[in-house]
């Protein structure tokens, strides 16, 4: 699903943050991207989403049998740690996506209502999205992404600054999304219930990417 070749990226005249000769990924595993502060995790995720253009090398996503370079709008989504929310109600944020999807009338209403329930936001439907707590904001951003049925979600520190309950809630949602067949790469500094569920680790260190894969807790 993902094929990265000879990738290198840096800013201004600085040396490359890292060099990644080859990274193939089938998109089935739940991936935890880790690395020290400044190792280039956000930059890597933004490159995979097509929000930056690599200095060198190529990134190809295979979606529905077609190989494409990012950006892949609606298919490969990047979610920032403090996701942008439209300045309207919680339900309004989801209705916006419903319209984008071409849903109208009862179809749109039912799907928005079902997603609000699924993400535990039904009681907040009429609240202004920007007044939500950090955990609720992330759940709304995930709900909005989910309505788009993306093939890949790239999550930048989705549980940073959240308390234990909010981490558990967000983690459950991300796992559910992953179980629907959406490929997920998430960056996180702290181990959490979410990172413990990951079965593949991409570690940016010493200007390179180390990959470890686990099956039933055993490295393969
Ligand atoms: N637009 C930019 N212009 C110049 N330098 C940048 C830019 N974006 C990132 N950098 C630099 O690239 C390096 C990697 O940044 P990045 O945010 O990708 O790291 P990170 O691993 O996500 O860090 P953290 O864990 O602290 O969030 C940092 O030194 C940062 O200052």
Image (cartoon, rainbow, N blue to C red):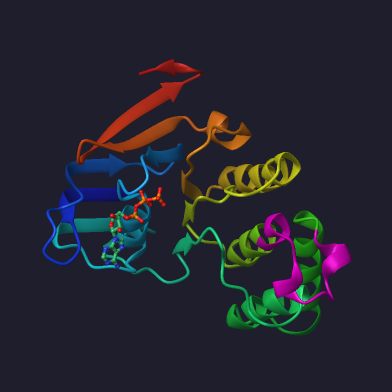
User: Quick one: 5 or 9, which is closer to the camera?
Assistant: 9
Quadrant of the picture in which ligand 1 is shown:
bottom left
Query: Quick check: 208 left or right of 121?
Result: left
Q: Position of residue 205 (x, y in %)?
A: 26, 36
Which of the 4 quarters of the picture holds residue 43?
A: bottom left
Who's the residue at 34% across and 27% down the image? 212
| Residue 125 visible in the snapshot | yes
Specify whether residue 129 is painted magenta.
Answer: yes
Residue located farthest toward the top when viewing the structure as drawn: 218
Which of the 4 quarters of the picture holds residue 84?
A: bottom right
Q: Which residues are magenta?
A: 121-137
Who's the residue at 39% across and 33% down the image? 201
Q: Position of residue 71 (x, y in %)?
A: 34, 69
User: Quick one: 163 or 93, which is closer to the camera?
Assistant: 163
| Whether residue 123 is situated above or below residue 97 in the rendered picture | above
Who's the residue at 71% across and 39% down the image? 164
Query: Quick check: 84 left or right of 73?
Result: right
Who's the residue at 56% across and 51% down the image? 158
Where, quadrant-wise, is the C terminus in this rendering? top left
Specify whether residue 143 is painted magenta.
Answer: no
Which of the 4 quarters of the picture holds residue 56?
A: bottom left
Q: Position of residue 51 (x, y in %)?
A: 34, 69
User: Quick one: 62 or 50, which is closer to the camera?
Assistant: 50
Query: Quick check: 112 left or right of 38?
Result: right
Q: Position of residue 188 (x, y in %)?
A: 49, 42
| Residue 65 visible in the snapshot | no
């Amino acid at each position: 699903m993902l094929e990265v070749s000879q990738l290198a990226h840096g800013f201004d005249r600085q040396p490359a943050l890292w060099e990644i000769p080859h990274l193939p990924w089938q998109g089935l595993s739940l991936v935890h991207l880790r690395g020290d502060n400044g190792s280039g995790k956000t930059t890597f995720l933004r490159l995979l989403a097509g929000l930056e253009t690599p200095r060198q090398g190529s990134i190809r996503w295979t979606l529905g049998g077609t190989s494409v370079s990012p950006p892949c709008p609606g298919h490969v989504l990047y979610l920032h740690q403090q996701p942008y929310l439209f300045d309207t109600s919680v339900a309004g944020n989801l209705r916006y996506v419903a319209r984008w999807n071409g849903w109208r009338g009862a179809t749109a209403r039912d799907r928005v209502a079902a997603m609000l329930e699924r993400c535990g936001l039904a009681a907040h439907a009429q609240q202004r999205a920007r007044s939500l707590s950090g955990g609720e904001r992330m759940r709304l951003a995930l709900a909005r992404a989910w309505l788009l049925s993306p093939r890949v979600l790239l999550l930048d520190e989705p549980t940073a600054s959240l308390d234990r309950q909010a981490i558990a809630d967000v983690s459950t949602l991300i796992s559910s999304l992953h179980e629907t067949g959406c490929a997920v790469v998430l960056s996180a500094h702290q181990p959490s219930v979410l990172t413990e569920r990951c079965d593949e680790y991409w570690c940016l260190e010493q200007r390179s990417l180390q990959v470890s894969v686990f099956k039933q807790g055993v490295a393969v």
